[in-house]
Image: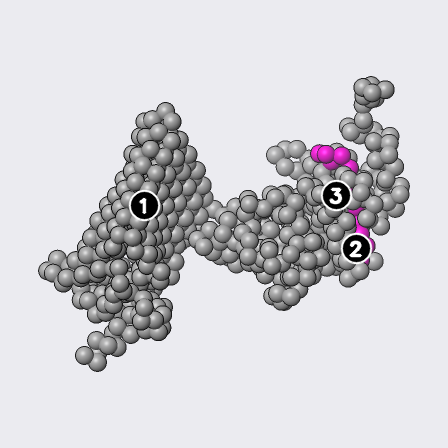
Amino acid sequence: MEVLQLKNVTLTLNDSTILHNINIDFWDGCVHAVSGPNGAGKSTLASTIMGLEGYREIQGSIIYEGKNINNLSVDERARLGITMAWQDPARYEGLTIRDFLLASSKTKDEDIIRNALSSLSMNPRLYLDRALDKTLSGGERKKIELASILINEARLVLLDEPDSGIDVESLERIFESIRLLKKRGTTVILITHSLAVLQQADHAFLMCSGEIIDKGKKEKIIKYFENKCIPCQHKNIPDEWEPTIGK
Amino acid sequence: MENETNLIKELLEASGIHSRIHKDPDSAYLVIHHNKVVGLQGVPGIEVEPQEKADGIHVRFLVRAGTHIVKPVYLCFGMMQNEGEQKIIMDVTIQKQSKVNIFAHCTFPNSVNIIHRMDAKIHVEKDAYYSYFERHIHGEEGGIYVYPKAKVTLEQGAHFKTEFELLKGRVGLIDIDYECTCHAFSVLEMIARISGRADDVIKIQETGHLIGKSARGVLTTKIAVRDRAKAEVYNILTASAPYARGHVDCKEIVQGQARAKAVPVIEVSDSKAHITHEAALGSVDSKQLQTLMSRGLSEDEGVELIIKGLLS
């Protein structure tokens, strides 16, 4: 059963149409991937679903649990059970990691917060009182973002490029978190152009130039990566050039 | 007498330091209510001499050379009544190689029409350390006018850190004017954190002159203004000696009809000196706010948390 449906969703920003007539169903409790090359519109799609500022003036409908949420603000959507992890998460001067995670938690249970950090190989004793500012590396900030998602207990989670800035060792922890979300029954939408992340999905959509051009089991979409791009009439057809150095 | 005792107790409790002072006979303190000294306790190594005069209270404060005062010294200045004028003239000398931390609480919880003036002359001698944390607690009416002024001299290797915090109650009008001259190898840190609302007015002028070799200075101002409040910040930092280093940082969050202005002035007249500045004024960062809202916080709750962080 679908928990989220996009029906004929078109988004125009600065006279340029970024999303073209998108029709997607996201199924309850399933890990979906929205994949495609840079500039395909994947992050824009996530921002539109979350209802971020500048992404709410759409044509078409976004239906969540059977209800049209087009006119709902970000926090109203969040309170219905949708949340999102940013590709490049915000930093907060003066706030500690504890402040941020408590704000993300509905129960305010510090044990749950500690467990979420530990599950991402982050020692709570070392991190909880640290500032959530530029003293953290991109990878650390990314893991804290994911920890905040784990404790938020949303029903639908958008993860925008969850592996960006993450070292190889931490990558498996990120994937474990995705599996944990699925085990809890959370619907996960992975925004990715990474083969490794796509492998975590049950089902995938392929985007190109603001359109959904293919969908199906991940094995079908993975071919896109193997072939660099599936044959299509869109703009992102790979060129024929191949490096000759070393050949 | 009993009334006065109660008054002191009320003032210290409103300042949040009543139990700390009374449970610790080893802490030095000075309590001034309106223009009257109502509490004084010294510790070895410190000289505190307040004098009640017609133009206000004159306080000579001295830390003897080589003395490290381990526990903070508490200063409590305030008024429990709702109107009147308090003036304090401080003459501070931190003698060479001494060290002291001051916690000053300026408490006017019932202010309706109160003027608080502070004129300080501060001399931090060679290799001495002086830290002055000043917290203001005001009432909710806004009828308060605060004029803190200080002229500071740092001798070679001296370190002066001052933090001004006004986060509880209404600002009313505050007009800060601090100026510091920094000799060789001295360190200056000035931090102001103020939250204004309604028709509060915040004026800050902080000036540092790095005139000695390798002197260092950082001026930091963090302001949040809401409703119709106004803030004007002038941070001036000059460097005229080799290897002097300085930085000016001003951040102001503006909400509603409030207005904020920042004028950083940096001037370098030695080719081996270096000063930087950064200023950010405006509404809260959109990504910060939307992240918090995507976790379920309302816009107001998100803004509150971001401002809390900025002013922490």
- Is residue B232 rendered to the left or right of residue A67? left
Tell me the residue at 32%/27% (across/down). B269
Colour logic: one colour
Crowding at mark 1 (Cα within 10 Å: few <14, some 14-19, many 20+): many
Assess whether residue B70 is covered by the magenta stretch.
Answer: no
Q: Is B166 drawn above or below residue B276 in the view shown? A: below
Tags 1 and 2 in contact by the CB under 8 Å rule? no
Task: Using the numbered discs, state the Cα–Cα distance from disc 3 to disc 1 in whole angstroms.
Answer: 49 Å
Q: Nearer the viewer, mark 3 or mark 1?
A: 1
In the image, are marks 3 and 2 on the same chain?
Answer: yes
The residue type indicated by label 2 comes to Arg
The outermost residue toward the left is B54
Tell me the residue at 80%/42% (across/down). A196
Q: Which residues are magenta?
A: A26-40
- Is residue A163 rendered to the left or right of residue A246? left
Tell me the residue at 41%/34% (across/down). B276
The answer to whether any part of residue B180 appears in the image is no
In the image, are marks 3 and 1 on the same chain?
Answer: no
Q: Chain of mark 3?
A: A
Hey, which quadrant is residue B205 in on the image? top left
Q: Chain of mark 2?
A: A
Task: Using the numbered discs, state the Cα–Cα distance from disc 1 to disc 2 in whole angstroms.
Answer: 58 Å
Q: Position of residue B58 (x, y in %)?
A: 16, 58
Of residue B13 and residue B242, the one placed in the foreground of this image is B242
Label number found at residue A168? 3
* Residue that mark 1 sits on: B127
Q: Position of residue B303 (x, y in %)?
A: 50, 54
Q: Nearer the viewer, mark 1 or mark 2?
A: 1
Assess whether residue A27 is covered by the magenta stretch.
Answer: yes
The residue type indicated by label 1 comes to Asp
The residue type indicated by label 3 comes to Val
* Residue that mark 2 sits on: A179
